[in-house]
Structures are given as C-alpha cells and as structure tokens.
Amino acid sequence: MLNRLAVPFAVAAGLGFVGGAAVLAGSGRVDLTPDDRARVAAVTAPATTFTAAERFETMSGGAATTTRTPDTNAFSHASANLGFEGEETFKLGNGIFKKVWVSSPSSTQASDGLGPLFNARSCQRCHLKDGRGRPPLATGDLPGGLLLRLSVPPSTNEDHARLAAKEILRVPEPTYGGQLQTFAVPGLPGEGDITVDWERHDVTLQGGETVTLSKPVYGIANLGYGPLDPETMISPRLANPMIGLGLLEAIHPADILALADPDDADGDGISGRASMVRDPETGAMVLGRFGWKATAPSIRVQSAEAFGGDIGISTPLVTDAFGECSIAQQACRDMPSGVQPHLGDVEAPDPVLELVTFYAKNLAVPARRGVDDPAVLEGKALFYGAGCASCHTPKFVTRRDADNPEHRFQLIWPYTDMLLHDMGEGLADGRPVGDASGSEWRTAPLWGIGLTETVNGNTFYLHDGRARTLLEAILWHGGEAEAARDAVAAMSPDERTALLTFLGSL
C-alpha cells in the first residue's frame, strides 16, 4: 500500500509528461492532503530509466494483487487483501456469476427468468474463466462472448433531445433493440444468427516480416422478427476480462480528467476525451469508465445492464422482466417471467446484484512476471519510446475514500488512461454511442494481457476479436495511435520481440 512506501517528496518529480503535456498526478484530488499529493505525484511519475524494474512494479493491483500460480484460473482469484467476510461474499457472488438461468416456469424458482431473448445463460459463458470472450471464426460457429450491438441514427426531435440530454446514449433499432439476441426460450425464435466474412491485407515490417491482418465483417441472417431498419448500424463487442474492475472504479476522476486533451492543445496528436454519462441511479453526469466505449459509469450499472441485455434477468436497477424484447415483439413480452412476488418485484432481487457486483469488483489482477528480465526492460523502454504510454498510462494511485477499503490508496499499474481516443478508420465501427464517435474507443487496460492464452486457450484481441496476436493488435492502431504503430513497424525484429516480451509480462 502507498502509505507504506518510502518515496521522494519533491513535487517536481511528479511531473509526468503524458501526451506531451505536463500533468501533476493527484493535483485535483480532494481526497488527498498536500503531503499525499506530493507522494502520489512522485510514485506515479513516468519511468525515465529502464535498467531495473520500478519499486512495487510486480504488484500490478497493489495489495489486492494475487500472487498465486498463473494457471488457467489466474483471473478468478479474489483480491489478496480481502478479509474472511469479504472472501465469503466473493464466493457467493462467484456462485451467482456462474449460475445457469432457466426459462419460466421451472421446477426451481431460484433460477427462473431466463430471456425470453438472450445471448447467454450465465455471466461466465461470456466472460470465459473471468477472461476474454471468443469470436466466431466462421458463419455457424457459435460465439463464446461476442455479441452485436444495434442502433439507428436519430430521426425525430425527441431522439435528438434525449441524446442531447443523455437520457439515452443511442437510438435502438425499432424491432431488435440495442443488441442482437441469438437465443430464445422454447416457443420463440431467436432474433437471428451472426454471420462473418473476412477481409485480409498484408503489412510488411522493418526486417522484411510480413503480417497478415484479418478484419471480420459481421452480418445477421435468419432474422426472426422481420427486417432490420435499413439504416441499422451494427458493431461487434467481445467480452472483456473481469480483473481489476474495482481498482479501475477507484481511480479518482480528477486523475483521469487531468489526462484529457480533447482539442490537442499541445499539438502532439493525442487528444483523449472523457466519456460523460448520466448515472441511472443518481441522475448526475459522471465519468464513464467501463465498456469498449466507456458508456457504463460503475460496475453495478454495467452488471445490471448485462443481466438485462445479455441474459434477460431483471434486477432492481434494470427492472424489465422481458429483457430486451421491444414493443414490436409482443409475443416475447407475453412470455412468463421469473418474478417471484414473495421475493420481490424482479427476477434477481436483492442481494443478487450486490453479490455479483462485489465479485466483479474483487477479481484480482495477477502479479507481473519477469519484471527484471533484460528483454522485458528493453521492451518497456521501447513501449515508452514508441509513445504507447501516452494512452496506456502505466500507473495510478487509487482514491483514499474508495467504497471498498481493499481498494483505497493503492499504487496500481493498469496501463490505461480510461479515455476515448480516435483509433482511425481501420478500427472504426461507424456507430456513435454517447460521447464516443464511430472511430473512438476507450483505451483498453493491459494488465493481465500476457496471460490471455493461459486462461482462455486462445488470443483474440480488440473489440471484435480480429487480432490473433498482440503484434496484430498493435498494427491495427491508427488515428491518434498511428505514430506509435509506425514506430513499432519500424523497429528491428529483435526490438519487436523485446516489446512483445514486455507486453507478455503484464
């Protein structure tokens, strides 16, 4: 924990040049004393030498880091600093996270309420082993954690007004809603089947290496409820790893907003923007943190939306028992629900959502491996030198007043700035959501990325799973990340190997 660190108190040491602009970490935080601010500034200053690992670099999640053997369960351990009662709550949440829901009515009322339309029957079936989802590799191959978001451009004054007020973040497709549900309970058709085709092109790197980049083109066949609106925008979403979410939520918004440079005032080509969303619980405008376009303000909100949209289970926060069935799908709305009046008004009454939220908040980040390895240190220097750290901000100190005591005042290494960045036409989905344009994405955290294959048995990266290696993921970067991508392409083969070794250590 930071309060046990012996760090310099010179405030000047905390001037981190992120995206070319001097940012004093912690300077806008009301949860810190002046002494704290100096300590935070010093400990979060960007690395300037790369001959040895930084202090505490192994502990990516601070005191919550798991140091257990990095095997197939590496993403499924509880925060290491949870007490006995916390571990008990974590295990209860894990049970619900893995719970397989069934259609109503059934012989077990505790699991009733699936659908009527759904993408998965449990949280775990999208977040495989609490890790990354798997995209379909061909038409007919069922996805394991990839779904298609749907929306249409605003067409009425009401649409424009609600978008401007952020009462909604996008206009759902009139019949099929905000996402395609490929499955349905008995007696109903699913909404459709995902199709996929591939576009490929080669990139030649310094040293003569040729890399084939593959872009999936997703579509929908066998529509179950009539045609799509002709202006429907479709965007795939691959389920993200679950680790470290509570620590990301505990980063003070002032530290994230301090990194934003929406007008690129310093002219460095990096113009990260905050995603501001309306918190459905309070009505206040707050920082969006979670999801590929940073549209969810909290883990609780994201969990409730996933219950409702992905599984069709109502919670105290998303109360429609018919899930995403639209007003054009009356047969779907008329199906039996899993609401048990003696338990409450929703299919997953308290404390189900709270338990799952606690579980999601406390999935631990694995410890780094090989931080002192010369190849890792060389790769780290190349990561900084290429400009990758301009968006993948290495470290933060979480807020002193975080909701969970285990997350308070921790030095963490997530490698993200939590901001939206224009990633260029190559990665654009053409579908704006909230503050995010059709080419903007939230910087993905990199912690744990080197254990993807260990946990999930595959390596599929980016929002649609197109990248099969970390190098492919880098080469898809464009827009604000184009200079960094070009720097990697211009590296010698040995340098690229060192860079990938560093990423593999995260």
Image: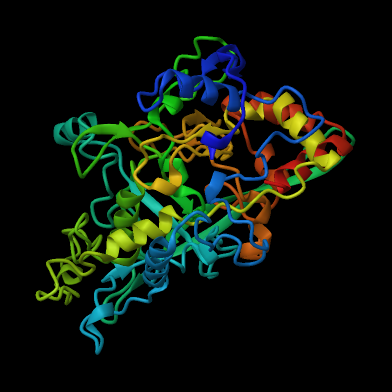
Q: Quadrant of the N terminus?
A: top right
Quadrant of residue 137 within the rendered picture: bottom right
- Numbered label tally: 0
Relative to 506, residue 20 above or below: above
| Residue 112 screen position, x and y as percent | 25, 78
Residue at x 44% of width, y 45% of height:
407
- What residue is shown at x 59% (from left), y 39% (from top)? 413
Image coordinates for residue 3, horizontal then vertical, percent: 51, 34
Task: In the rendered view, tell whether residue 101 sits above or below residue 146.
Answer: below
Q: Pinpoint residue 446: horizontal percent, then vertical percent.
A: 60, 43
Camera-nearest residue between 97 and 48: 48
Furthest-top residue in view? Answer: 266
Quarter holding residue 322: bottom left
Q: Position of residue 264 (x, y in %)?
A: 50, 14
* Residue drawn 62% across the image and 21% down it: 8
Q: Which of these two is toward me, 198 or 479?
A: 479
Q: Nearer the viewer, residue 128 or 95?
A: 95
Q: Looking at this view, is 132 or 394 the one in front?
A: 394
Give above or below for 47 relative to 230. above
- Outermost residue, left direction? 341
Query: How is the rendered protein coloured?
Result: rainbow
- Residue 57 falls left or right of residue 431: right
Taking 488 as reference, is 293 left or right?
left
Q: Quadrant of the rendered structure where residue 383 is? A: top right
Task: Locate residue 151 relative to residue 104 in the image: left or right.
Answer: right
Report whether residue 234 is seen.
no
- Specify whether residue 164 is in view: yes
